[in-house]
């Protein structure tokens, strides 16, 4: 960001100023919000809780904008903020309300022009992923859906990279076993 200052009518001095972290957050939130909401949905398992968590994350991000370093990965920072808010909420509750999960049958998947078979398969996969433990669900979303590298996901979740690899391995084994059982039951 630059600002021109005319000091003597004919000479222009250009001053470069760094965009404030709050301004950058406010400008980029609309772009990142759909991904933030999706991440919130995966860790909460409920549309209403996901919306509340995403909004709380946006508010916290603006309040704590001083701790965000401009020019870095806003999405990673927001996911980490959301993770911390969610964990703090869980700690504050004695028992999670109904395990915080919403049956996948109640979740509306938008028709993006794909055929019925694709939608059915997407619901089936979402159902299987939704049945994974919360830590594995969040890890699967960050790595396989959002495309973060293992180290980036580890940073967001605040765990060692080995834990990320372990969670993904366990999730793959669980999903493979469940898909195998479904195939055998269908035969």
Image (cartoon, grey):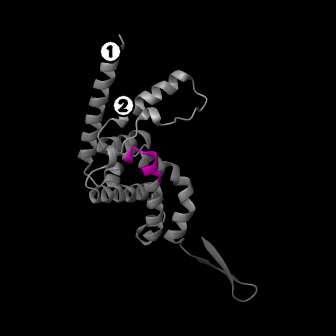
123 lies left or right of 96: right
Magenta residues, as a range?
44-51
**Local secondary structure at mark 2:** helix
Identified at 37% across, 37% down, the residue is 130
Q: Nearer the viewer, residue 109 or 100?
A: 100
Q: Could you tell me residue 105's position as x and y percent?
A: 45, 32
* Magenta span: chief secondary structure: helix
Q: Could you tell me residue 6's position as x and y percent?
A: 70, 84
Residue 60 got which mark? none
Residue 49 falls within the magenta-colored stretch: yes
Displayed quadrant of residue 183: top left
Residue 185 got which mark? 1
Q: Could you tell me residue 136's position as x and y percent?
A: 30, 41
Residue 98 in the image: above or below residue 83: above
152 lies left or right of 59: left
Displayed quadrant of residue 46: top left
Residue 118 in the image: above or below residue 152: above
Residue 185 in the image: above or below residue 6: above
Upstream in sequence: badge 1 or badge 2: 2
Q: Quadrant of the C terminus?
A: top left
Q: Could you tell me residue 92's position as x and y percent?
A: 29, 60
Q: Nearer the viewer, residue 39 or 185?
A: 185
Residue under numbered circle 2:
128
Q: Residues within 10 Å of mark 2 (few under 14, many from 20)?
A: some
Identified at 31% across, 20% down, the residue is 180
**Local secondary structure at mark 1:** helix
Task: Estimate the spatial distance between the alpha carbons at disc 1 and disc 2, rounded to whole Å.
Answer: 15 Å
Residue 187 falls within the magenta-colored stretch: no
């Amino acid at each position: 960001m630059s600002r021109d200052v005319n000091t003597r009518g004919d000479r222009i001095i250009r001053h470069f100023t760094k965009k404030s972290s709050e301004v950058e957050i406010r400008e980029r939130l609309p772009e990142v919000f759909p991904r933030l909401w999706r991440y919130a949905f995966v860790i909460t398992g409920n549309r209403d809780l996901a919306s509340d968590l995403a909004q709380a994350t946006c508010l916290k991000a603006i309040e704590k904008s001083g701790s965000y370093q401009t020019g870095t990965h806003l999405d990673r920072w927001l996911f980490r903020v959301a993770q911390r808010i969610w964990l703090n909420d869980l700690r504050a509750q004695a028992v999670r309300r109904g395990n915080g999960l919403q049956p996948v049958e109640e979740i509306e998947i938008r028709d993006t022009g794909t055929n019925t078979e694709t939608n059915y398969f997407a619901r089936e996969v979402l159902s299987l992923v939704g049945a994974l433990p919360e830590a594995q669900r969040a890890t699967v979303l960050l790595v396989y859906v959002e495309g973060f590298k293992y180290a980036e996901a580890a940073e967001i979740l605040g765990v060692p990279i080995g834990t990320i690899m372990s969670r993904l391995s366990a999730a793959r084994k669980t999903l493979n076993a469940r898909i195998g059982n479904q195939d055998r039951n269908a035969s």
